Image: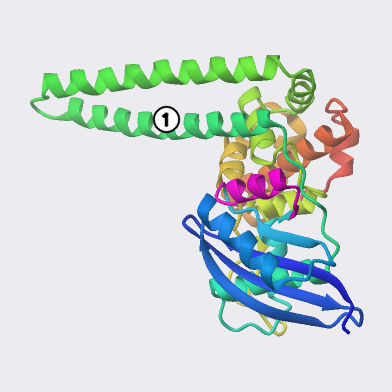
């Protein structure tokens, strides 16, 4: 009789479906993928997944459900499993992509991705997911809504500018555009009030926001966005991991000893985090002499302004992590020495 050590359900989550692979590890650490199937990403599909899994797996060993943190599409399943008391592990996407590169996989499909997640769960000791505080989910919904609203308002202002530039502007069109802009302004004000209320009602969050906003260039909205998009850094264990999660890590295409193509940021991460750090980086360069000096040094080194701004974005994001974890107010002497700017 084979003694099992681990049983893992690897789930590749998409908007409408779950691509699932089941795997087991025996006492000799041999891994076997035993089955695969696709389910709907809804409660009916969740129930079918549980029934199928429990039918094929042994009841002598606990089952671990492992999945990637894919935007918001994995959340309903994670909460469903957690409510049942099942073991759930949520893995940052960059961890899985790095792991896949170690496998002999030529073509990445939903099936091969779920198999990779299963193998990862069997080979590694994964942390069991704990429900994040509800406040982070609420903050994320509001900050993303505001971001979308700002985009709509910018589009309308551009439309208004074009209308006014015409030889014979349509007054009724201009009036309607102005009405929509007024509505969006009011909605943004409402969202800011809701955000302020959520923060005020959570003393720990008040403290976190206060410490993070001590960093030059980081305002309340940026601090809240970073905390919301990381669930208070729940899954983050290092500065490097955070930078990779945001897609601000630098990638190089190499062949042998030759570099093919210019180094560039991966952008394979949370776009909301990247966007949140752009304006604070510009503000830090303008208002903090240390950041301004680093920016000037980088420009002198390679002459690429945007590359230097991205380096400052990485620096600021790393600082938010350090300050949130230590609870220390930003100190211009210590923290600048603690982190090196990537060139």
On screen, 312 above or below 120? above
Label 1 sits on a secondary structure element that is: helix
Q: Quadrant of residue 83 in the image?
A: top right
Does residue 206 appear left or right of residue 254 in this picture?
Answer: right
Q: Which residues are magenta?
A: 72-88
On screen, 247 above or below 156? below
Q: Quadrant of residue 263 in the image?
A: bottom right
In the rendered image, residue 300, in percent from the top left (x then y), is placed at 67, 50
Mark 1 lies on residue:
149
In the rendered image, residue 10, in percent from the top left (x then y), is placed at 67, 66
In the rendered image, residue 209, in percent from the top left (x then y), is placed at 73, 24
On screen, 71 above or below 26? above
Does residue 311 appear left or right of residue 274 in this picture?
Answer: right
The quarter of the picture where the N terminus appears is bottom right
Badge 1 density bin: few <14, some 14–19, many ≥20, Cα 10 Å: some
Does residue 260 appear left or right of residue 56 in this picture?
Answer: left
Does residue 150 appear left or right of residue 208 in this picture?
Answer: left
80 drawn magenta: yes
């Amino acid at each position: 009789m084979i003694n099992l050590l681990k049983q893992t359900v690897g789930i590749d989550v998409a908007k409408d479906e779950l691509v699932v692979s089941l795997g087991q590890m025996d006492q000799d650490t041999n891994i076997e993928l035993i089955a695969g199937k696709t389910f709907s990403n809804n409660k009916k599909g969740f129930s079918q997944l549980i029934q199928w899994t429990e039918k094929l797996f042994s009841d002598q060993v606990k089952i671990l459900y492992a999945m990637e943190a894919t935007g918001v599409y994995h959340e309903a399943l994670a909460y469903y499993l957690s409510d049942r008391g099942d073991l759930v592990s949520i893995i940052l996407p960059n961890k899985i992509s790095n792991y896949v590169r170690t496998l002999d996989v030529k073509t990445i499909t939903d099936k091969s991705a779920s198999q990779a997640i299963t193998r990862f769960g069997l080979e590694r000791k994964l942390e069991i997911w704990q429900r994040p505080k509800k406040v982070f989910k609420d903050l994320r919904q509001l900050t993303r809504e505001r971001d979308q609203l700002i985009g709509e308002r910018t589009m309308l202002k551009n439309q208004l500018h074009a209308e006014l530039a015409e030889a014979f502007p349509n007054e009724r069109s201009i009036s309607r555009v102005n009405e929509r802009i007024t509505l969006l302004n009011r909605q943004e004000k409402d969202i800011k009030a809701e955000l302020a209320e959520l923060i005020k009602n959570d003393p720990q969050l008040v403290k976190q926001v206060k410490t993070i906003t001590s960093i030059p260039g980081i305002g309340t909205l940026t601090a809240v966005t970073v905390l919301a998009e990381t669930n208070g850094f729940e899954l983050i264990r290092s500065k490097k991991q955070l930078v990779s999660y945001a897609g601000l890590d630098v990638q190089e295409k190499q062949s042998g000893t030759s570099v093919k193509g210019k180094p560039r940021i991966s952008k394979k991460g949370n776009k909301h985090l990247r966007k949140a750090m752009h304006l604070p980086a510009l503000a830090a360069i303008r208002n903090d002499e240390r950041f301004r000096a680093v920016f000037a040094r980088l420009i002198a080194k390679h002459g690429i302004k945007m590359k230097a701004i991205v380096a400052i974005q990485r620096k600021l994001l790393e600082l938010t992590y350090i300050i949130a974890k230590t609870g220390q107010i930003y100190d211009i002497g210590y923290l600048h020495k603690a982190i090196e700017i990537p060139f």
